[in-house]
Each structure stands twice: as C-alpha cells, then as structure tokens.
Image (tube, helix red, strand yellow):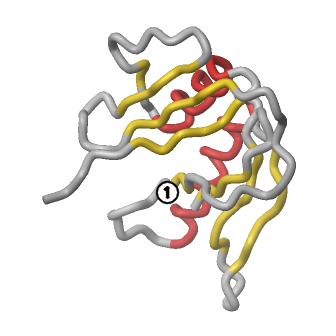
Amino acid sequence: MTTHWTITYDAADPRRLARFWAGALGYVDEPGYDFADGAALIDPEGRLPAVSFLKVPEGKTAKNRIHLDIRVAAGQPVEQPVREQRIRTKVAELVAAGATTLGEEREPNGELSHIVLRDPEGNEFCVA
C-alpha cells in the first residue's frame, strides 16, 4: 500500500514561493488550508504529491539536499530538438516568474540534458 506524502519547503515568504511553484507545476491552492505562516499546493487532478511552504526565521545557507525537477517531456518519446525547445520554453516562463538560470548540463553527445535554475528564494531545481 502506498502512502500519500508532501514535500515541504522552508521559506521566508511562503505565499510568494507558493505562487511561483503553482505556476511552475500547474498546481492550485489546497482547499481549506488556512495557516498564516504557510501555504500548500495540490495537483488539481489529485494524482501527484502536494507541496507545502512553511515560514522559517533563518535564510537558505547551503545547496538543497532535495529538490524538484520539472520534466517537460516525461513519459513522452520526443525528438531531441522538440525536447530542447520544450525545456527552453519552460525555462523562459520560469525566469519571467522570478527564477534565475544557473547553467546548462549536456550529455556526452552534446544534447541538452537539463537547465539548472533557482526559485525566487534561491532553491535550486532543474528543468529537463
């Protein structure tokens, strides 16, 4: 039997970070979640894990030990040029929403593997 789980981010501004990730993931606010120092998002189709954000007094001090990767071509066989364009399109959307691009990683054959970014509070994540 599987267990439902939530990934939780510590945040200086939980609601701001939740707005960013709602757009990044296509998630919506969790109905009934009413906590002044937090925010929670759910998959509107109810299939994927929830994401929550809790206010903490300290700032981020080191690289994340866990992070989300956004997979724009997951489960779909696509040609490399199409996959790369999907990655770049999603990265452009995320940068417009407040992310910062850190760099690109390539496969040994030169194909784009993923792009590394930071969310508005500095948490690293990848778009692949």
In the image, is 21 to the left or to the right of 99?
left
Q: Residues within 10 Å of mark 1 (few under 14, many from 20)?
A: some
Q: Quadrant of residue 97?
A: top right
Inspect this view and state whether residue 20 appears. Answer: yes
Q: Identify which residue, 60 or 49, lies in the foreground.
A: 60
Q: Quadrant of residue 27?
A: top left
**Number of callouts:** 1
Q: Is residue 1 above or below residue 28?
A: below
Image quadrant occupied by the N terminus = bottom left
Q: Is residue 5 above or below residue 96?
A: below
Question: What amino acid type should be assigned to the residue bearing mark 1?
Answer: Arg
Q: Is residue 123 above or below residue 104?
A: above
Q: Identify which residue, 119 or 87, lies in the foreground.
A: 119
The residue under the point 40% across, 14% down is 33
Image quadrant occupied by the C terminus = bottom right
Q: Residue 88, percent across and down?
A: 66, 52
In the image, is 85 to the left or to the right of 78?
right
Q: Which residue is mark 1?
A: 71
Q: Residue 10, percent across and down?
A: 66, 36
Q: Residue 8, percent across and down?
A: 53, 40
Q: Identify which residue, 82 or 91, lies in the foreground.
A: 91
Q: Secondary structure at mark 1?
A: loop
Residue sticking out furthest to the bottom = 108
Inspect this view and state whether residue 86 appears. Answer: no
In the image, is 84 to the left or to the right of 100?
left
The residue under the point 76% across, 30% down is 98
The residue under the point 33% across, 64% down is 75
